[in-house]
Amino acid sequence: DARREDLPDLRGDEPDPASHHREGDVRALSLLERIGSHPERTAVVDARGRTTYGGLLASAEAIATALLAGRASLDGQRVAILAAPGAPFVAALLGAWRAGGVAVPLALPHPPAEHAHVLDDAGVTLALADAENAGRLAPVAAEREVRLLPLEAEGRPAATRRTGDLPRAGEAALILYTSGTTGKPKGAVHAHGSLTAQVDSLSAAWEWSADDALPNVLPLHHTHGLVNVTLCALANDARVEMLSGFDAEGCWRRLEEGGLSLFMAVPTVYAKLAAAWEAADAAERARRSDACRRLRLMVSGSAALPAPLFGRWEELSGHRLLERYGMTEIGMALGNPLRGERVPGTVGAPMPSVEVALVDESGGACPDGAPGELRVKGPTLFREYHGRPEETAKAFADGWFLTGDVAAREEGRFRILGRASSDILKTGGYKVSALEIEDVLRLHPAVTDAAVVGLPDEEWGERVAAAVVTGGASLSLDSLRTFARERLAPYKLPTRLLVLEDLPRNAMGKVTKAAVRTLFGAPSAGR
Ligand code: AMP
């Protein structure tokens, strides 16, 4: 396989002084044009070895040729990608773009029913899968007449000619599926331009350079792992090392080997790393702490970072975690400073190119300290929810995106107070719709009604808890999980169950989620 070289040392890259910060006219280039100006540098390291930028682009070109099958452009056709984090995934993404397609990354742990929803909702016509996952996708693809192509080099035509024009900034590039209050996940469409704007904003804020290298422990169907980690690394000629999934011991081992500069993760990952640090002996602890001290920056986001974890992490690593706030639809909107004080419990100030506003219930601007809805504007915003004009329209007011998050500003710093709707929870950094889970639970033959809530949890942020009505039948958590596993991703499965005679409701007959939480013993305060 010519794309991979056999280099024993994972950390041999020499810093390249010519490929530092890009400015001025270069900013107008699309992300695709920026990637690979130094073909010999290592782009991606994964379980199979390392892949250079040159190798990555050659693979992308070959994938584009295969996708095009003689046509000049895919003209925005949707290309689903199901592959483990690694060079083939990245080549698939770039290949889809190179062919004029819109990439739709599928979530690895999802069951076929969730993949089917995404293929249908996005109107996918082409799919790319690695050898490990192609078998799972094949029946779902075949039912929909989606053409499924293998990602591995075998069976793929060599790129014999240059593919067509590069996509322009305004063209759609990526659809990421994200949960909302309306049930099934919806697809947030980003154009090449908004992805470039996100990468520019993060590169400037966190001073990315070609000397950076970071491990990726996050899934690639979510904005955190895909944009903040992978695309930022590629756009900066830096190196991303895909660890297969997250495992605290494996992650500590890789950190200890050194040669890395950045680390980005969700709070749950930091909680697990902290627990593994605490379980280690004194010598091992010291090595782990040293490993962290050699990094220049550690970032947390995608869910609230509890202040005790911030403190614990500072003690064990010497790093005051840089907490930032963002969303699939808008990229990163707020962040603590790279240089300057990082205050636990706050998410700092607007990121470069991002405008934010806090609006009270009557639509007026909130004074300092007063909670209001966070609204965001700027070039990093998504274009629309795919095929859902009404939901797109409802998500904006006067060009501002309505985040649905409640926040307050204190001395120029923002504090996130929670979601305005109790029907969206965050577990392990994943956004989950309570309504979607309830719909599935109600399909169980013993369940007549269901209410799903998030319970505060130190490790997971929130835990998925289900209260169900069965009309007297007994039901165990295990059997409910087994039933739901066929239809829902593993992180959406309830981990607590209450069987009730009826759900608590208000005078209008609407289920009161706060009362459900109280039944689980959770504090009634909060949302
Ligand atoms: P997602 O689109 O999956 O990234 O989820 C975005 C949501 O995650 C936001 O609307 C917030 O509710 C939540 N979120 C992201 N970052 C933070 C943070 N630093 N603190 C609290 N909540 C956050």
Image (tube, rainbow, N blue to C red):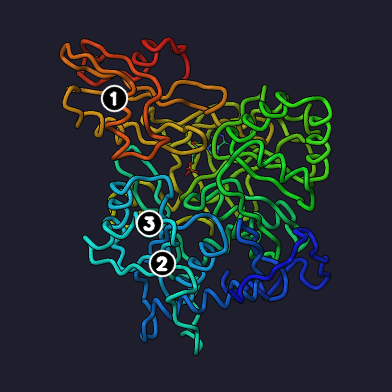
**Residue under pointer 3:** 384
Badge 2 crowding class, 10 Å Cα cut-off, few under 14, some 14 to 19, many 20 or more, is many
Residue depicted at x 37% and y 24%: 453
Q: Position of residue 136 (x, y in %)?
A: 34, 54
Secondary structure beneath dot 3 equals: strand
Mark sitting on residue 479:
1
Is the residue marked 3 within 8 Å of ligand 1, measured from its CB? no
> Disc 3 residue type?
Glu
**Residue under pointer 2:** 102
Q: Is residue 182 visible?
A: no
> Disc 2 residue type?
Val
Q: Is residue 156 left or right of residue 298?
A: left
User: Marks 2 and 1, Cα distance to the nearest angstrom?
Assistant: 39 Å
Q: Position of residue 190 (x, y in %)?
A: 45, 60
Secondary structure beneath dot 1 equals: helix
- Work out whether mark 2 precedes mark 3 in sequence or the reverse, and give the earlier one: 2
Q: Position of residue 270 (x, y in %)?
A: 64, 33
Badge 1 crowding class, 10 Å Cα cut-off, few under 14, some 14 to 19, many 20 or more, is few
> Nearer the observer, disc 1 or disc 3?
1
Asked where in the image residue 146 lies, by quadrant, the reply is: bottom left
User: Marks 1 and 3, Cα distance to the nearest angstrom?
Assistant: 38 Å
Q: Position of residue 521 (x, y in %)?
A: 43, 9
